[in-house]
Image (spheres, rainbow, N blue to C red):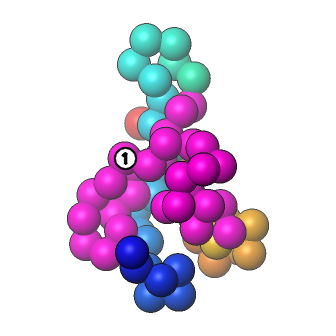
């Protein structure tokens, strides 16, 4: 597991569910790998994205 302070998170954008259109995940490049991160409090990557969003050190683009 990568420690939060060593994670490099870039290119974050919201991703809607294909069927409902509801925002259910975030696509982000984490340590050079494009990842689909579910919006769920029990997800480690989502908690780190949320922490940085709340701290103002990360922004998330609107869905395409």
Instruction: Say how many tags the image has.
Output: 1
Q: Is residue 11 left or right of residue 62?
A: left
Mark 1 surroundings within 10 Å by alpha-carbon count, few (fewer than 14), some (14 through 19), many (20 or more): some
Residue at x 57% of width, y 43% of height: 39
Answer with left or right where residue 35 lies relative to residue 13. Answer: left
51 in relation to 39, above or below = below
- Pick out the residue farthest to the left: 33
Q: Which residue is mark 1?
A: 36
- Kindly identify the residue that appears in the image at 58 percent across and 68 percent down: 48
Asked which quadrant contains residue 29, the reply is: bottom left
Residue 25: say if magenta: yes
Which secondary structure lies at badge 1? strand
In x, y percent, where is residue 53? 67, 65
In x, y percent, where is residue 43? 54, 52
Q: Locate residue 22 relative to residue 19 in the image: left or right.
A: right
Q: Specify the segment rendered in magenta.
A: 23-51
Asked whether 61 or 24 is in front, the reply is 24
Residue 17 against residue 34 in the figure, above or below: above
4 relative to 52, above or below: below
On the image, the x and y values in percent for residue 37 come to: 44, 49
The N terminus sits in image quarter: bottom left
Image location of residue 18, percent across then percent down = 39, 19
Is residue 12 or residue 46 the one in the foreground? 46
Q: Nearer the viewer, residue 53 or 64?
A: 53
Q: Residue at x 48, y 83 (%)?
A: 3
Viewer can see residue 59: no
Instruction: Point out the residue furthest to the bottom here.
Output: 6
Residue 27: in magenta span? yes
The residue most toward the top is 19
Q: Quadrant of residue 50?
A: bottom right
| Quarter the C terminus occupies | top left
Up/down of 56 relative to 61, above or below: below
């Amino acid at each position: 597991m990568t420690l939060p302070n060593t994670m490099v998170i870039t290119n974050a954008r919201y991703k809607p569910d294909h069927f409902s259109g509801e925002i259910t995940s975030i696509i982000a490049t984490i340590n050079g790998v494009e990842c689909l991160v579910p919006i769920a409090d029990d997800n480690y990557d989502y908690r780190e994205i949320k922490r940085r969003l709340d701290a103002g050190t990360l922004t998330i683009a609107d869905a395409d």
